[in-house]
Image (cartoon, helix red, strand yellow):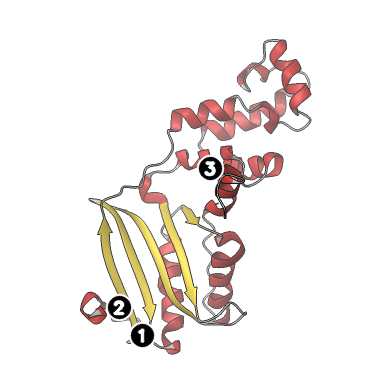
Amino acid sequence: PLGAALDAGPSDLHRDLWVHRSVVASPVVPVSREAARDALRGALWLLPGVRDATTDRLRGDGAATLDALRDHPRFGPEARRLLARLDRGDPGGLMARVGDRGGRAHPLALALSAFFDPGDFLFLDLETMGLFGGSPIILAGLAHAAPGGTEVVQWIAATPDAERALVVAVGREMASRRALVTFNGRAFDHPYLCARAAFYGAPILADPVHFDLLGFSRRTWRGRVPD
């Protein structure tokens, strides 16, 4: 029976909040950091004023990377700022630049996962009692790197009264991670969770770098699969 696989939540949480934990053998494996750095250094289009034609002209003049533009009279200052972010491993700032210049679903945005360790990622998916605003969250599925693979944690609100405790528990998990991974979470899961937290007077202040895999998936497989 399902109940046999469940444990009650911590004692400071609601009695009707349940948690199910399991570990799957698949590890969390980020993109190669070296490959990501090389890709970013070669992305001249990250500089304001640089698009395809200008990129071709600069490369024709021997400037194939941001490093080669450090002293450029027009693009040098911005190239140095980007390289400084790259050197200090600033995925948030780099994500904003990639999103502004190439869109949030650009493959280079996903490559920024390289600047995190496996334990930095929190995977999130919510189930609610309906899609209209104000519907209680009844299940929050989380996953994170753990010894032996990936731990999957399901917080289950057995009654509506337990939703506040569920939201607080997920908020604590989010505050302990640097990166959030979802599928359509930018439009639904993350803002919905924050709205329910605000409703209960327990706002979620954590702002991890967000990798929403829906956009990347659409960009990669559009036209190749039915949906």
Q: Residue furthest left?
A: 4
Image quadrant of residue 98? top right
Which quarter of the picture shows residue 9? bottom left
Residue 145 appears at what percent x and percent y?
A: 33, 52
User: Where is mark 3, residue-wise?
Assistant: 110
Decide: is 33 above or below 92: above
Question: In the image, which is nearer the foreground, mark 3 or mark 1?
Answer: 3
Name the element at disc 3: helix
- Residue beneath disc 2: 9
Q: Nearer the viewer, residue 75 or 129?
A: 129
**Which residue is more in the foreground, 196 or 131?**
131
Tag 1–tag 2 contact (CB < 8 Å): yes
Give residue 103's quadrant in the image.
top right
Callout 3 crowding tier (Cα within 10 Å): few <14, some 14–19, many ≥20: many
Residue visible at 41% across and 85% down?
162
Q: In terms of secondary structure, where does tag 1 sit?
A: loop
Residue 210 seen in render: no
Tag 3: amino acid: Leu
Q: State if disc 2 and disc 3 touch (CB < 8 Å).
A: no
Farthest front residue?
Answer: 226
Between 101 and 169, the one lying in front of the other is: 101
Place of residue 45 in the rendered image (x, y in percent of width and height, measured from the top left) = 70, 30
Tell me the distance, in whole angstroms, between the alpha carbons under discs 1 and 2: 8 Å
